[in-house]
Structure formats: structure tokens, C-alpha cells
Image (spheres, rainbow, N blue to C red):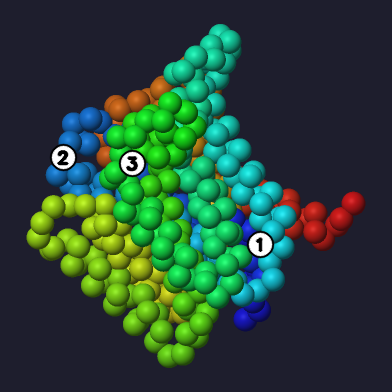
């Protein structure tokens, strides 16, 4: 089987990407679309049930998976000569796109540039946090033989300072949005950057230790299982450290399970389903932006987007139908973009 080159959210790596990486990110994309549909359309009564409360925990594993995979890809290329300019440009593009998705157009149309407008505009979400994580990892890479030690130190920093910074307000809206959730940020830098650094460390260790035998079992699956279970049963107060380790454990279990199972999936799985999952993984940035626009921005028959037109009014069957519709449109847009790019490569102007 020929090696497959794909594009990550951070940069085009020098090493060929393994298919299971795209599959992991593709499954995370599908889970992300479902999460936004469930949170946006499912009735408030159903969202207060025990089964949905438990489901929310698994929804919360999607973002750490994205951060971890992005760091993993950088870690795999540690020690190689990677040009900085393309990576910086791509990270700045992701950062700008993240802020663009948060643009409060209603306020701007009224020429309202007050504090509330800036607060909404500068909130940290997945894309902004992912971009900053990429910049942090790029700095770590430049430290040569000290890269791993610095990654561990920074990971401890972003975990350990989450609680001390929880109430900090500097008066600078853009800084406050990065430090904590007081300004409405869903993904401030603390502790979420730590997941990207954990992925970087995992990727670098994997490259250093090699892939002999059942490396996926003892490197990721078993440590992940131990972390997830121990953090679930550990007595005492729930801290940022237990929050981080428990979710990291689940991400490691996802990675280990998918890595070990992927050869069997390739043999017995449906090729169409595989292609769709891999497409979502390769075009995860397109999928992220597309489904958000479809749900929250694109005006429909009422002049309002889908989220406002329907709201929290749907039962589970209807939510599943909406999820399937949004997912199909999202994957179709991903396919169009990839098909157009492939056609352009075959027939350059």
C-alpha cells in the first residue's frame, strides 16, 4: 500500500501520515458535529436526564483529542528540519479564522465597539487555542535536546496555573480571554494547551522508541486505561490535574484502540465508511468551519440560522436526523474542496 500524505491542522509534516491518525481525527469530527447538534436542538428536558449527563462527559473528550493529535504530528517530526514560515502562516490563518467565527456582526453593524463587543470577539475557542498551542510547540521544537524537558515543564505550567489564574482579571480583554473562562472563553489556554504538549511528547517518544511489535498496547492503550480508571476512582477533591489526566487517559485509549484495530478495519470494514471517516480527518478544519456555519450562521427560510429557527425543541429521533443531514452536507463540502485541490494539482494553470 502506498504511503498517504495528508494535511494536519498545524502544518504539512515531512513524515507520511498513518491512516489511523486521520481516522482518529475523522471520528472526532463526527463526534463534534453530533455534540453541537445535541446541545443545540435537543429539548432542555432531555438534556437534564442522566443518560445525557453521562454523554456530556464523552462530548468533552473531543477537544482534547484534537489538541493531542495536533501535538502528536509535531512530535513525530521532532529533529527534522521543518521550515518555520509555512507553519507560522498556517497557524496565523487558523487563529484569524477562529476570531472571524466569533465576530459579533450585529454589534458591528450598529458600529458598537464597546467592551461587550470585544469580549465576544476575543473569546478563546478551539481554533484559537489550537493555534496558540501550535506556536508554543514550535518554540519547544527549537530547543533541541532540551525540547522534551521543556515540553514537560510547560505542560505542568499550563495544568498547575489553571486554578490560580481562574479569578485573574488584568483588564486586557484579549489576555483575560486566554487565561480563564470569566470572559466567556470555552477553551482558554489553561489547561487546554497541555493536551497539545502531551501529544507532542507522545509523538516524540514514539519516534524515539520505534514501532516494534505491539507498541500501541504498552505505549498508549494500557497507560491510558490506568490513567482513566485511576482518576475515576481516586478519592479526594477533583482538581485540574485529575481533570487533565482522566481525559488524557481516554484519548490514549482511543489512540491505542484505533491503532491496534485499524489493520482489521481495513480488512473487514466497509470501504465507503472508511473513506468518509478518513475524508473528515484529512479535512478536519473544513469540517469544523462548515458545520458551524451550517448550524449557527447560514440564514434559512426564516431569515435566521438553523440554531435559532429550531432551537431546543427536538426529540432524539429528530436530532439524529438533523445530525445526519448536517454531517452529509459537511462531508460533501469536504469532498468538493479535496476534489478541487486534486484537480488543480493534475491540471495546474
Vertical comparison of 95 with 243: above or below = above
Q: Quadrant of residue 315?
A: top left
- Residue 279, visible in the rendered structure: no
Q: Which residue is mark 1?
A: 12
Earlier residue among tags 3 and 1: 1
Image spot of residue 82 (x, y percent): 68, 66
Q: Nearer the viewer, mark 3 or mark 1?
A: 3
In this view, which residue lies farthest toward the right? 349
Label 3 packing within 10 angstroms: few (<14), some (14-19), many (20+):
some
Residue at image location 37% in from the left, 79% down from the top: 219
Q: Determine crowd level at label 2: few under 14, some 14-19, many 20+ residues with C-alpha closer than 10 A.
A: few
In the rendered structure, are the residues bearing label 2 and label 3 in contact, judged by CB atoms less than 8 Å apart?
no
Badge 1 or badge 2: first in the primary sequence? 1
Work out how far the residue at label 3 is from the one at label 1, CA to CA, in angstroms: 34 Å
113, above or below 71, in the image: above
* Residue hosting label 3: 165
Asked whether residue 143 appears in the rendered view, the answer is: yes
**Nearer the viewer's eye, disc 2 or disc 3?**
3
Tag nearer the camera, 1 or 2: 1
- Dot 1 lies on which element? loop
Residue wearing tag 2: 49
Tell me: residue 209, above or below residue 330.
below
Residue at left offset 23%, top offset 72%: 226
Residue, far bottom: 213
Q: Tag 1: Cα neighbours inside 10 Å, few (<14), some, or many (≥20)?
A: some
Circles 1 and 2: CB distance less than 8 Å? no
Q: How many marks?
A: 3
Q: Camera-side residue: 251 or 282?
A: 251
Distance between the Cα atoms at labels 2 and 3? 33 Å
| C-alpha distance separating marks 1 and 2 | 43 Å
Q: Quadrant of residue 87?
A: bottom right
Amino acid at each position: 500500500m502506498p504511503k498517504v500524505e495528508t494535511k494536519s491542522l498545524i502544518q504539512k509534516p515531512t513524515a507520511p501520515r498513518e491512516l489511523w491518525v486521520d481516522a482518529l481525527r475523522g471520528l472526532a469530527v463526527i463526534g463534534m458535529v453530533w455534540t453541537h447538534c445535541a446541545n443545540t436542538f435537543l429539548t432542555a428536558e432531555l438534556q437534564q436526564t442522566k443518560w445525557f449527563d453521562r454523554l456530556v462527559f464523552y462530548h468533552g473528550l473531543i477537544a482534547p483529542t484534537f489538541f493531542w493529535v495536533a501535538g502528536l504530528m509535531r512530535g513525530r517530526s521532532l529533529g527534522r528540519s521543518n521550515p518555520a514560515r509555512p507553519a507560522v502562516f498556517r497557524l496565523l490563518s487558523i487563529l484569524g479564522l477562529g476570531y472571524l467565527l466569533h465576530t459579533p456582526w450585529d454589534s458591528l453593524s450598529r458600529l458598537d465597539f464597546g467592551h461587550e463587543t470585544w469580549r465576544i470577539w476575543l473569546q478563546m475557542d478551539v481554533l484559537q487555542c489550537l493555534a496558540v498551542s501550535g506556536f508554543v510547540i514550535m518554540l519547544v521544537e527549537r530547543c533541541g535536546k532540551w525540547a522534551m524537558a521543556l515540553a514537560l515543564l510547560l505542560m505542568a505550567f499550563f495544568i498547575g496555573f489553571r486554578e490560580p489564574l481562574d479569578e485573574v482579571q488584568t483588564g486586557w480583554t484579549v489576555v483575560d480571554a486566554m487565561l480563564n473562562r470569566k470572559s466567556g472563553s470555552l477553551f482558554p489556554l489553561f489547561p487546554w494547551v497541555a493536551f497539545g504538549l502531551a501529544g507532542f511528547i507522545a509523538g516524540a517518544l514514539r519516534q524515539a522508541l520505534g514501532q516494534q511489535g505491539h507498541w500501541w498496547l504498552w505505549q498508549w492503550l494500557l497507560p491510558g486505561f490506568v490513567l482513566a480508571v485511576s482518576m475515576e476512582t481516586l478519592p479526594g477533591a477533583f482538581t485540574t490535574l485529575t481533570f487533565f489526566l482522566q481525559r488524557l487517559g481516554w484519548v490514549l485509549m482511543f489512540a491505542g484502540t484505533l491503532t491496534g484495530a485499524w489493520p482489521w478495519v481495513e480488512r473487514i470494514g466497509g470501504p465507503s465508511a472508511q473513506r468518509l471517516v478518513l475524508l473528515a480527518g484529512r479535512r478536519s478544519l473544513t469540517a469544523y468551519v462548515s458545520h458551524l456555519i451550517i448550524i449557527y450562521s447560514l440564514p434559512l427560510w426564516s431569515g435566521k440560522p438553523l440554531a435559532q429557527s429550531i432551537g431546543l425543541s427536538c426529540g432524539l429521533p429528530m436530532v439524529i436526523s438533523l445530525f445526519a443531514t448536517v454531517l452529509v452536507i459537511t462531508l460533501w463540502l469536504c469532498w468538493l474542496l479535496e476534489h478541487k485541490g486534486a484537480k488543480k494539482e493534475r491540471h495546474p494553470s
